């Protein structure tokens, strides 16, 4: 096992923040692909994905970037009070089954002066099927002074879960 992969496995194992339901993954299969998906899980999920999610108030699109080393970046544009706000969440993923991962990402919500208003932690369960993903995600809101990474701290508000689907953004030639 190379050093980068070993560090990613240790980081994902130590995180322990994402929800994982009925994983079925074991330490022996943690980094192996299935027989019909010979690549390791990191190479299977790595890439950019366009997703559509609905928390019950209408669907919206966002992007998620999954890295082979277990890191995540999420982006979307939120329209609030007539203004557009780009949100970026950073986080991690870990394997929970042969084609499933758990994801946790954190957004800092700030006012126009840069003062922290709240943290939004997004947790999700993702199933990967080739160039398609699907799953559920929920949001947990924490106020300034609360530690959103402490699993013993309860959020002040929870929304979701919402269902999502997505497609891999593939590279195309210029023709």
Image (cartoon, rainbow, N blue to C red):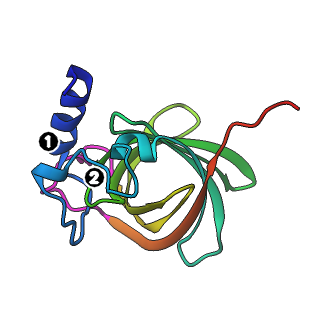
Q: Give the left or right position of residue 25, taking residue 46 as reference.
A: left
Image spot of residue 125 (x, y percent): 36, 63
Total tally of numbered discs in the picture: 2
Q: Nearer the viewer, residue 94 or 3?
A: 3
**Can residue 117 be seen in this snapshot?**
no
Residues packed near mark 1 inside 10 Å, few (<14), some (14 to 19) or many (20 plus):
few
Neighbourhood count class around disc 2 (C-alpha, 10 Å): few under 14, some 14–19, many 20 upward: many
| 39 versus 165 height, above or below | above
Q: CA distance from mark 1 to mark 2?
A: 13 Å
Figure quadrant of residue 138: bottom left
In the image, is residue 85 part of the stretch drawn in magenta? no
Which residue extends farthest front?
35
Residue occupying the point 16% across, 44% down: 13
Choose between 93 and 150: the one closer to the eye. Answer: 93
Q: Nearer the viewer, residue 106 or 33?
A: 33
Q: Is disc 1 placed on a helix, strand or loop? A: helix
Mark sitting earlier along the chain (1/2): 1
Above or below for 131 versus 20: above
Is residue 61 in view from this perspective? yes
Q: Any mark on residue 103, and which? A: none
What is the secondary structure assignment of the residue under circle 2?
strand
- Residue 31 position in % (x across, y down): 24, 44
Q: Please name the residue shown 18% across and 28% down the image.
A: 1
Magenta region's main secondary structure? loop
Q: Is residue 146 magenta?
A: yes
Q: Which percent across, then down, holds residue 40?
A: 33, 43
For disc 2, the marked residue is 95
Q: Quadrant of the C terminus?
A: top right
Query: Does residue 20 lie above or below 173 as drawn?
Result: below
- Specify the segment rendered in magenta: 142-156
Task: Say which residue label 1 marks.
Answer: 14
């Amino acid at each position: 096992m190379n050093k980068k992969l070993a560090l990613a496995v240790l980081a994902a194992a130590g995180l322990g923040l994402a929800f994982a339901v009925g994983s079925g993954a074991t330490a022996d299969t943690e980094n192996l692909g299935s027989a019909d998906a010979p690549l390791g899980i990191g190479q299977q999920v790595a890439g950019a994905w366009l997703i559509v999610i609905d928390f019950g108030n209408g669907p919206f699109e966002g992007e998620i970037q999954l890295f082979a080393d277990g890191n995540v970046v999420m982006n979307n544009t939120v329209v609030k009070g007539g203004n557009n706000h780009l949100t970026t969440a950073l986080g991690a993923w870990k394997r929970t089954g042969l084609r499933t991962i758990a994801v946790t990402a954190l957004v800092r919500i700030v006012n126009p002066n840069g003062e922290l208003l709240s943290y939004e932690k997004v947790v999700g369960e993702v199933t990967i099927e080739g160039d398609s993903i699907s799953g559920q995600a929920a949001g947990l809101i924490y106020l300034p002074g609360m530690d959103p990474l402490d699993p013993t701290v309860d959020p002040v508000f929870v929304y979701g879960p919402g269902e999502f689907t997505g497609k891999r953004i593939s590279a195309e030639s210029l023709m």
